[in-house]
Amino acid sequence: MRVATQTGPVNAGAASAGPGRFRRVKPVMRTILSRPSGMAGAVLVTFHLLLVIIAPVIAPYDVTQQDADRILEAPSMAHWMGTDSLGRDVLSRTMLGGQVSILITLAASLIAAVWGGAVGVSLGLVGGRIDEVCMRLVDAFLAIPGLLFLLLIVSFAGGGVFALIPTLSFFNGISVVRIGRGAAQSVAARDFITAARVRGHHSRFIIFREMLPNLQDILLVEWAMRWSWMMLAFSSLSFLGFGASPPTPDWGLMISDSREFLTVAPWAGFWPALFLSTLIIGINLFADALGKALYVDRENRAPG
Amino acid sequence: MLKILVRRLVSALFTLAFVAVVVFAVAEALPGDACTAYLGRLAQGERLDNCRASLDLDQPAAKRFVHWARDLAQGDLGNSLKRKKPIEEIVGPRFRNTVILGTVAALIGIPLAIVLGVFAGVYRDKIPDFVISGVSLLAMTIPEFVIATLLIFVFAISFQWFPAVTILPTDAGIREILPNIVLPVITLAFVMTAHILRITRASVIDAMHSEYVKMATLKGVPFRRVVFRHMLPSALLPTINIVALTIAWLLSGVVVIEKVFNYPGLGTLIIQSIFDRDLPLVQAIALMFALIYIAVNLIADLLVILLNPKLRSQVSGEGG
């Protein structure tokens, strides 16, 4: 406690130099990057996000272009990562293989964090009967394995991969509700809220100015965790044959297609597996570092 | 204590009932019905009428739900559309196979996770912790099908120690199954260990910072005794419940792992039945998975109640 208060003024001074709402971004990013694991996470996530944007421009081949003469070719100067069972360039397909899954899961995780956070925080604040009933429902929903439900809905509802967005965000939002509610309850019990009450502030002021900044941190980290879960779920669906559909390059699908040729052409599966895994590891490392950095930042800025 | 037990049992039944309602409602909300989904382009004329009649689809949904729920309660899951057999017969042996897979993995994974988790927690931020936490992060983030494919590549293709896929009749005996499930068990146990290990580690770290551990250390109790007598009992108890909650996550993993190794369990069956568009069978399997989850959580709760000294003392309190 003492240590935190001593470093407080220094950091608070540096932080207040930035403009307006985003004044926390700089110190938080600095703390994330100061740890090797946070650095690795930030680099991996940035790399993959950049790739989504620039891959269509820099990919050396057309991802659907087949070449019957170059089937399952080992890596060479012409095809740096070799070719797959239809003679398509593995490098180009791997570079573009995250596009669909990343866009869908990013959108779905944002929706999940917003609706889950809003409902969860409200439940935590309202309490009472409504809260009790809703939490019962939440617990019951959590008893259904997520992937199974996705399978059930995706396969019978149709509508392609974009139909996954509402389903993913609904189910993941339910776990956010739980987190948001718990966070709201624990923040509501903290001393500075009591202090604000005693000072006679409006409850609107207390909710938006005193509580939300604290909840933001928890929800931000939860959003990153949901994103990582969704990437895992989406690629599993693709792997099982229920996600992205064939000519689309997609990591899960590419790994599943390459399994038949594992002995003769391991590269066709290795690269998409590496890209997929590094993205999910990156998100987790980043989320972990983000949580710690936000905590450190808040402790530093807390008035001594 | 009896009161707590009864309350817990009622809540488990409530959850099961709710899951049944959701599974039924989702099937109702989907466009078309079980018969149009199953028959696809053939869904017309007499064929469609016969199929609908066999499922009573001409009845209102509420009435069908009551029938379905009543049959469920009596253990009658209805008939599979594709296989034209009672679902209990199809699901029974596969349910057993999935339980075997999960149980063997749990028998390996849970003790391993507790030992490693305690070790990492006690030696927090030292080399053993970095190694254990690092590997567990990899196990949790790398998709199961990648881990499984990697294991196949190394142990089935390069070394040829174990079969890459399970080729077994669904109703094979346990003795025949066991040598075949080495790789699926390793994959599942690996992922399971990682999840439980992280929970144990966090809980141990919490307990190591507690007043009573500091007190014991200050009193001069030997470190080993502090860890085993003072810290562990209170650190491990709350992890039981959280471990049970991660089962939902692991069940999704089971589906993928079974599919990769072609293991004749519920996971491969649900994927097959989705490809067959056999909605009654899919619904039944989804319910079975929920049942496994609820049962595991119930067992965890009962364990906690039995092991918790506070609740145990309430027994004598209530009795007196």
Image (cartoon, rainbow, N blue to C red):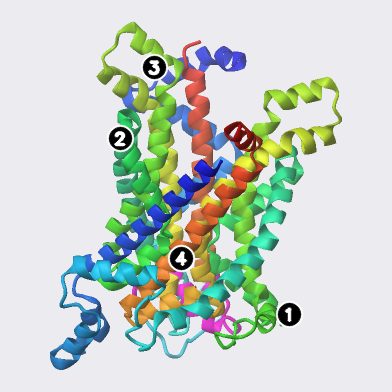
From the image, tell me which residue sits under label 1. Answer: B159
Please name whichever residue, A293 or A69, is drawn nearer the observer in this view of the structure.
Answer: A293
From the image, tell me which residue sits under label 2. Answer: A129
From the image, tell me which residue sits under label 4. Answer: B289
Establish whether labels 4 and 2 are both on one chain.
Answer: no
- Amino acid carrying label 1: it is Phe
Above or below residue A253? Residue A110 is: above
Residue A87 falls inside the magenta stretch? no
Label 1 marks which chain's residue? B
From the image, tell me which residue sits under label 3. Answer: A193
In front: label 3 or label 1:
3
Please name whichever residue, A135 or A213, is drawn nearer the observer in this view of the structure.
Answer: A135
The residue shown at (38%, 43%) is: A176
The label on residue A73 is none
* Residue B237 falls left or right of residue A253: right
Above or below residue A11? Residue A265 is: below
